[in-house]
Image (cartoon, rainbow, N blue to C red):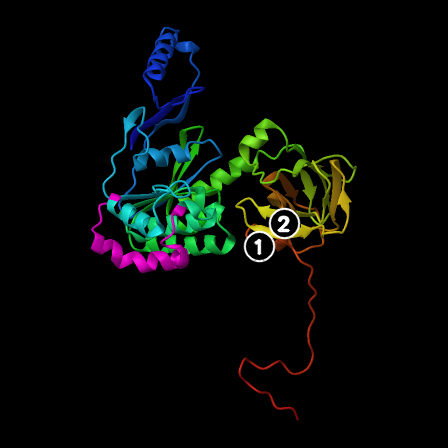
Amino acid sequence: MRGLAKRYSLGERAVLHGTLRDAIGGGARRMLRAGRRSHERDTIWALDHVTFHIAPGEAVGIVGRNGAGKTTLLKILSGITDPTEGEARVWGRVGSLLEVGTGFHPDLTGRENILLNGAILGMRRREIMSKFDEIVSFAEVERFIDTPVKRYSSGMYLRLAFSVAAHLEPEILLVDEVLAVGDASFQRKCIGKMSDVTGEGRTVLFVSHNTAAIRSLTQRTLWLERGALVEYGPTSEVVTNYLTSTDLDIGSGVVDLTSEDFRRGVWKQTARNVSFDSLALLGPDGGPTAHVPELTPLRFEVGLRVREPIRFLEIALRVKTGEGTRIFSCYSGQRDLELDAGTHVVSCVIPRHPLRPGVYAVELGAIGINHQDIVPEAMRFEVEAGHHVEENPRYTESGEGVVRVDSSWSEIEGQARSRPGEIVSQA
């Protein structure tokens, strides 16, 4: 890939003209726009002259914040869109999973879509049918394989789309963050399959915010920011540098979850009646803070908005590592009460948190009957090292785990316990 760039004009959209009047009107608008001075047009470089090379059989991760250009890069490599500048040379059949059901025709059955996707990849019918049973079994859609996919649930759609992309053996497999849509068991299944694919020597490009998966599946990683290539190298180094850069953006300890900037980032609202308004982490003085010492209380205040009276609402607060791995979860418990419409604030207190020094993220969830709102990363905060002269200095070393637990040690007098499988006779 050499000088790969993609520019979009903000506010414009492609229109398929159905009538002569529409075509004439569209042409007139384009002529008027062409007469404007170029600096008046608002454009954005979704991909900004990126150059890199991927060897055959290499597994490469792609990381970056939302809007960094990750999906745009994969769309260019898959041929969905053309670059504005530069060139992308790709050798081999490309299988891509950039959106749920990419390449599927909604009116065709699951069986027909499998055959269609294989044909698009240039495979013979015999090759496709040799993988057919494996594809259907992996997707767990045996009962619905002859049903039009437009009647599939989003989960069924996703399972079949991934199964087709992974099993039809393209030389190059492009996978976007779409795997985050599936449930936990399906995600583990997909990660296992992708591990098999990389082990078979096929080239894989994997976009994900789950850096733990990036570490386990890829050897090299691209880091993009605002369309530009920041770093390309060994996965362990690039991911560490990427997480360090994002860790610096911790904030003040209070987050407005209704702001437009936040919604464009990590907001994933799926409910209409319940939504989160704010999250605050309070320090010993009662004010918001993003820095807390070790072995001290964590006090969170969660603001939420209820549009209609609701019963049986449960609030979940989960603390995760910077790589997205959940460390522990706290639940309010469902209660038989009715919350009136309006704003509410609930408090969650962890008397003595076990976290070691580092940067952590908070996930919020509001769970009820037909009501759900999830904010995967509502806040980041930092745990600072304590100053305990009397403790073992090894506790301050990195690599000693994520949490600290209390333990007591003492010598046991008398006969030692037997080794596994041995029986010690007593006198």
- Within the magenta stretch, is there residue 121? yes
Q: CA distance from mark 2 to mark 1?
A: 9 Å
Tell me if residue 211 can be seen: no
**Residue at image x 72%, y 54%?**
390
Neighbourhood count class around disc 1 (C-alpha, 10 Å): few under 14, some 14–19, many 20 upward: few
Q: Is residue 399 left or right of residue 187?
A: right
Q: Pointers 2 and 1 in contact (CB under 8 A)?
A: yes
**Which quadrant does the C terminus fall into?**
bottom right
Residue 228's quadrant in the figure? top left
Q: Position of residue 183 (x, y in %)?
A: 51, 52
User: Which residue position is annotated with label 2?
Assistant: 356
Q: Is residue 412 left or right of residue 399?
A: right
Neighbourhood count class around disc 2 (C-alpha, 10 Å): few under 14, some 14–19, many 20 upward: many
User: Which residue position is annotated with label 1?
Assistant: 400
First in sequence: mark 2 vs mark 1? 2
Q: Position of residue 351 (x, y in %)?
A: 75, 50
- Within the magenta stretch, is there residue 332? no
**Residue at image x 57%, y 87%?**
423
Question: Three-letter amino acid code at disc 1?
Answer: Glu
**Which quadrant does the N terminus fall into?**
top left
**Residue at image x 41%, y 28%?**
227
SS class, disc 1? loop
Name above or below for residue 145 compared with residue 69: below
Numbered range of the magenta stretch: 120-149
Which mark, by number, is residue 408? none
Name above or below for residue 18 compared with residue 124: above
Comparing 396 with 140, the one in front is 140
Comparing 82 with 363, the one in front is 82
Q: Position of residue 335 (x, y in %)?
A: 75, 51
Q: Position of residue 319 (x, y in %)?
A: 62, 47
Comparing 63 with 108, the one in front is 108
- Report the magenta stretch's main SS: helix
